Amino acid sequence: MLQNLYTNQLSRIHQLDARVKLLFTLAFILFLNLTPHQAWGSYLLFWSLIITLVLLSRINPALVMKRALICLPFVLAAFPLVFAGPSPRVPIFLPRGMMIHYSPEGLGRFISIAVKSWISVQAAVLLTATTDIPDLLTSLQQLKIPPVFTAIISLMWRYLFVIMDEVRRLLRARSSRTAAGCGKKHAGGSIFWRARTTGGMAGSLFLRSLERSDRVYAAMLSRGYTGELPASEAAALPRNQKWILLASILGLSILSLYGFLTGG
């Protein structure tokens, strides 16, 4: 899946400078999250803007929205707002005489956080789908982002593939040592056996990843790695792309202002 984040298409969005797309994405996420809670009209406009850009980039919108669902486990951290939000509290009657109270205001805030997170991740997915990772790293350097930060992102991206390789090896080894018996649909033992095996695989993955990362880092040092990426020359942005970036940020500020005027 990691290899397929970037989709090679011939579109105007793909042809934009990586710095323009990166700055637009950061501004989009910033303005969206500064928008007040329950500004549903503004959220709809932000989402419509992303879907429009997805269509212009010739990417399947369902793919973008599906990838954005990765934010759901993190959004659940805000779920207690439903019950611990501000007053008034509304009772909900459950079977066997049980009753719980929820906060309508807290529920609205939780839904707002979920919607904002989902749309924000869609913007990030659109960025990675229309911009190759080396171009993103180059744009970070050209924008004068601290070299250490850029190097961390670069190494994190490259070591993901190292970990994936180790995971494939562990899964291949497990498959070669387990087989489904006659009349069984799944290989292996009970669910407790599967849990113990999975835990052992996780520990083995951690140790093997550490060992392999040490070998990779030693190989990088032997080839002249100094802790920083090679510097790249910052070419000036074309004037038309500067105007596109300024117009986009102005439009985002208008959408956010509309949310302040109509938000709850």
Image: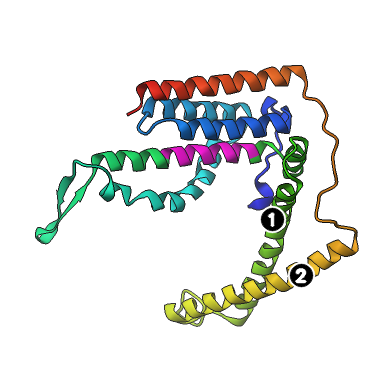
Give the color scheme: rainbow, by chain, secondary structure or one colour: rainbow
Residue 141 quadrant: top right
Label 2: few (<14), some (14–19) or many (≥20) C-alpha neighbours in 10 Å: few
Label 1: few (<14), some (14–19) or many (≥20) C-alpha neighbours in 10 Å: few
Q: Which residues are magenta?
A: 115-127
Mark with earlier residue (1, 2): 1
Taking the magenta stretch, the answer to whether it contains residue 126 is yes
Q: Position of residue 145 (x, y in %)?
A: 72, 41
Q: Position of residue 97 (x, y in %)?
A: 9, 59
Q: What amino acid does circle 2 point to?
A: Asp
Depicted 135 relative to depicted 81: above or below: above
Residue 54 quadrant: top right
User: SS for tag 2?
Assistant: helix
Depicted 84 relative to depicted 32: above or below: below
Which residue is disc 2 drawn over?
214
Residue 60 quadrant: top right
Q: Residue at x 73, y 55 (%)?
A: 155
Which residue is disc 1 drawn over?
156
Nearest the eye: 261 or 9:
261
